[in-house]
Amino acid sequence: MFKTRITELLGIEYPILAGPMAYMSGPELISAVSNAGGLGIMASLGYQTTDELREAIKKTKQLTDKPFAVNITLLPSARPVKYEDYFLAAVEEGANIIETSGRSPEPYMKLLKDAGATVMHRATRTKDIQTAERVGVDAVTILGMEAAGHPGQEEVGSMVRIPVACDAVKVPVIAGGGIGDARGFVAALAMGAEGVLMGTRFMASKDCLIHANVKDWLMTLGEMDTILIQKSIKNASRVVRTEHSEKILEMENRGASLEELMPMISGQRGRNVYATGDVGSGAAISVGQVVGMIHDIPTVKEIIDGIINEAKGIMQRLEKTGLAG
Ligand SMILES: Cc1cc2nc3c(=O)[nH]c(=O)nc-3n(C[C@H](O)[C@H](O)[C@H](O)COP(=O)(O)O)c2cc1C
């Protein structure tokens, strides 16, 4: 049940992917997702050098013999990054599923296809997934504005983005943004998606190696406790609503420059919070609106098994009403 072109393409049991999360999506978390039948995606730019990325891929291969992917986000970075080196490091270490995001993967498609990699591209705009399809990716992920991380400038929700995306491309579509349980999973498949990608739900899992205080804090948050910052610098980012993130928004509304914002939005601040658990220390912590549905911290396996089992129950319920089957 729930076999799609995505399970087939990626060689996984369930069409459930864990979106890359900087400083979290390392060997432990992504191998847990892959071992549970989904697909873990490594957040490569959390690694400062390609040697660190190579080490992380090697370690992941020791922890799982199942498929996993490596994300390379093609966005301007505060440090000099030669993306080509990251792609090369990933494929040379045998990571043969690559996820790109941020910009069109076109400049790297030849390198990736020559290496025999399967390429997925994650974006928020229909035109960007169409471009990705045109340059030869094998699958695309569309993100709704509910998503943690970068949900796009345009604020279009998953209920609209998913069906629009499915109509716009022929390659299989994975849906992300606001999905946290079997209801979202079944709904995404009903809208034409052939897989789902979740970030926040996996952040709030036992296998995510961040401080327990952060996870406890997530469970206190409601669906309205996130805000979009960084729209003024064309890099909208959904984070937890805190005094710190409200201050960033205030600075943006006053017309603050990127230079002024940089110290406030630096990823290092978040990294400190994940390590120390000091959630009040002032950092923009990525989280999706789906956090309002999260009331427990299960293992990744419990999350995935739970979704699959409950999804079967939903299908049976729909069958009884005559809506499915
Ligand atoms: C804590 C956290 C960190 C994230 N870091 C990244 C990242 O480094 N790169 C990236 O492309 N997406 C990042 N994301 C976004 C996820 O990969 C995914 O697109 C998103 O979480 C999906 O929406 P959801 O949170 O509603 O499930 C992050 C998400 C979270 C929750």
Image: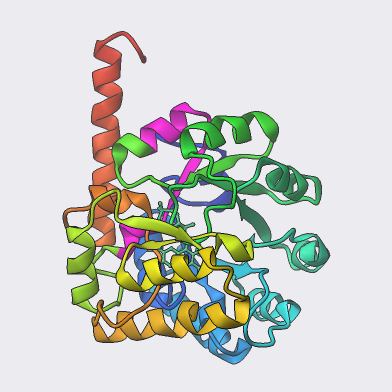
Residue at coordinates 67% horizontally, 74% vertically from top-left? 91
- Is any part of residue 169 visible from this angle? yes
What's the colour scheme?
Answer: rainbow
Residue 285 can be seen, yes or no: no
Vertical comparison of 46 with 217: above or below: below
Q: Which residues are magenta?
A: 185-203
Q: Residue 104's x, y, as percent?
A: 74, 58
305 vs 192, nearest the viewer: 192
Nearest the eye: 238 or 197 = 238
Please say whether residue 223 is one of the residues in the magenta stretch.
Answer: no
- Which quadrant of the view contains residue 27? bottom left
What is the count of numbered marks? 0
Is residue 195 within the magenta segment? Answer: yes
Q: Residue at x 55, y 76 (%)?
A: 44
Residue 174 point in image, percent of width and height: 53, 44
| Residue 23: percent from left, percent from top | 43, 78
Q: Which residue is pictured at 48% across the width and 65% down the height? A: 20
Look at the image and tell me in which quarter the C terminus lies: top left
The front one of 154 and 275 is: 154
Name the residue at the front extreme: 254
Quadrant where the N terminus is found in the figure: top left
Pick the front one: 324 or 273: 273
Task: Identify the residue at horizontal 40%, vertical 71% (top origin).
Answer: 247
Q: Quadrant of residue 297?
A: bottom left
